[in-house]
Amino acid sequence: MPPDAEAVARAVSRETGLTFEGRAGRDDGGTWIELHPAGHLAAETFIIRTAIGWRRLDITFDPGAFAQELIAEMGRADTIGRALLGAVLTDCRDDGAAVELEINGAPADPADDAIWSTEWTSVKLAVRRGMLPINAGDDAGDMRLVQGWTGRVAAAVTALLPLEEQIEDAPLPDVEGLPEGARIRIEVNRYERDRRNRAAALAIHGYCCKACRLDMELVYGFDAAGLIEVHHVTPVSELGPDYIIDPATDLVPLCPNCHSVAHRRKPPFSVEEIAAMLAARLPAAGEAE
């Protein structure tokens, strides 16, 4: 059974702050799902396509034929977006994926400042991961893999979309839509409410609590997929105004319980300290039974 494209779209929408629609199909190459920004023509925005083959996934970012201004805006991404793109793609490579990034028809490295000093006229991104336990009869496992790898590419793409920063107490991110020229703007705050940071952190670390190892989806089912909080290892108040967060080292996923415990003290308890608390208490809990 092919993965539920709308369920994947909902999960990716929650993490990126950009609402996606999903559809699925089958062709000679196998099953595929496609996500694109909801309520807008794919030709004016983009499609994230995940092809599901035997033991492999191929995820591509395909800009629409009339998305030239959006592509140019992505090439003007701020320093946060550039850093997040590099962090997510590096994590994909470290996890065994082949990553292809091309800017204006030439291979590109996000760490190369030269790619950010030229006007973007085309962009190609593909992430290919083989040797996966997929299409082996475990539909729930297939869903987790498709959602996880599709979410990684979505996190990389949305990191580059033009953003508008909100004031400190403004509502959580919303999508304004597409003005003329197919420009996408997502309103966010720089730190906790910058959904780019959250999406990148979860793309790198996954959805399992780093302290207690709880995965809400495994307990409650797919409707709880992605139900996790992201914790700043160093409190935001201690970061300078120009600090660029590294989602691989500065952010960790914690379940609501462990996140609350972390903030019972200033400075917060570390992940290691919370894990030690649990290790000390669990044997006692077992004896009490």
Image (spheres, rainbow, N blue to C red):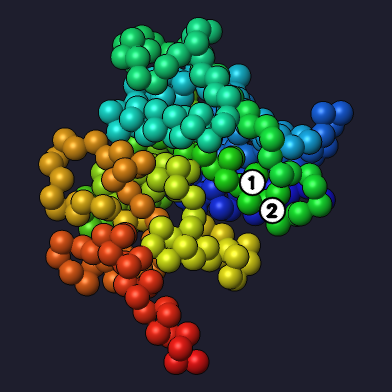
Q: Residues within 10 Å of mark 2 (few under 14, many from 20)?
A: some
**Observer-nearest residue: 90 or 125?**
90
Q: Indicate left or right for 61 with 143 as reference.
A: left
Q: Residues within 10 Å of mark 1 (few under 14, many from 20)?
A: some
Q: Quadrant of residue 184?
A: top left
Across and down, in percent, residue 25 comes to 79, 39
Q: Quadrant of residue 151?
A: top right
**Residue pictured at 49% horizontal, 50% vertical:** 206
Q: Secondary structure at mark 2?
A: helix
**Residue pictured at 29% horizontal, 28% vertical:** 78
Residue matched to label 2:
141
- Label 1, label 2: how far apart the Cα atoms are: 6 Å
Q: Is residue 277 visible in the rendered structure shown here?
A: yes
Q: Is residue 289 above or below residue 141?
A: below
Q: Is residue 151 above or below residue 265?
A: above
Tags 1 and 2 touching, CB below 8 Å: yes
In the rendered structure, which amino acid carries the disc numbered 1?
A: Leu
**Observer-nearest residue: 246 or 31?**
246
In the rendered structure, which amino acid carries the disc numbered 2?
A: Gly
Residue matched to label 1:
145
Across and down, in percent, residue 253 comes to 40, 56
